[in-house]
Amino acid sequence: MNEVSDRELFAFSARVLGALFYFSPTSEQTAPLVNALTHGDWVQDWPLAQEVLHPVAEGFKTPASETLTDAWQRLFIGPYALPAPPWGSVWLDRESVLFGDSTLALRQWMRENNIAFEMQQNEPEDHFGTLLLLAAWLAENGHHTERDQLLAWHLLPWSTRFLSVFVENAAHPFYTALGKLAQLTLADWQSTLFIPVADKPLYR
């Protein structure tokens, strides 16, 4: 596989996962993706071995009593405490707060690399979904070093723990499958990184 197709496959998977973790399942960004995962034959297009993906694909198609919109609200919005908060500083900051030191470090890195990333609302930039969307954008625009830095310094140090808790507490077959797909995909990315993943203490 050549470098261009590798880059395109990375960007494709990062953009799909990022959108599904960030946007409502009924939004224009994700509704087609939800339909493809629940009804389509997407496994052949995902850059992982099909035998690994088939159990995950079955999870996406499993019916549930809770609607997908209600599950998304419960997992990402509230009003009750989120079972697996999707912001890096919640896991990396000793006080488990939003806009923690790790968020400030991410902002500094973005400034140093002239990366402007407009958030839709006043929220931290270190949301799991938005970091994946940023990684996709970096890959699409040929910023390979910055993409690897983003993954190794600002996403992968906490995403393994976040996804483990997310899968354990999703309590909806679609989002459990989404968490597992993210686990498999990010583990594959980590195995091909040219720089080591930063070892940071986790507080949740």
Image (cartoon, grey):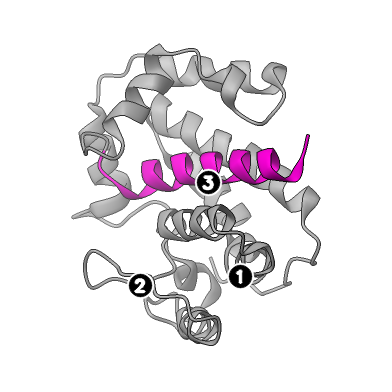
Which of 102/143 is in front? 143
Which of these two is toward me, 42 or 22?
Answer: 42
Q: Which of the 4 image quarters holds residue 200?
A: bottom right
Three-letter code for the amino acid on which mark 2 is drawn: Pro
Mark 3 secondary-structure assignment: helix
Residue 124: image tag: 2
Query: Which of the two labelled residues, at mark 1 and mark 3, occupies the earlier sequence position?
Result: 3
- Which amino acid does the dot numbered 1 rest on? Leu
In screen coordinates, is 38 left or right of 197?
A: left
Side (left or right) of 128 relative to 34: right
Q: Which residues are magenta?
A: 1-24
Task: List the residue tagged with mark 1.
Answer: 202
Say left or right for 151 vs 25: right
Determine the secondary structure under disc 2: loop
Q: Earlier in the sequence, mark 1 or mark 2?
A: 2
Which residue is labeled 3 in the image? Answer: 14
Which mark is in front, 1 or 2?
Answer: 2
Task: Say if 102 sits above or below 177 in the image.
Answer: below
Residue shown at the point (52%, 52%) measured from the top left: 136
Q: Quadrant of the N terminus?
A: top right
Residue 40 point in image, percent of width and height: 43, 13
* Cα distance between the residues tagged 2 and 3: 19 Å
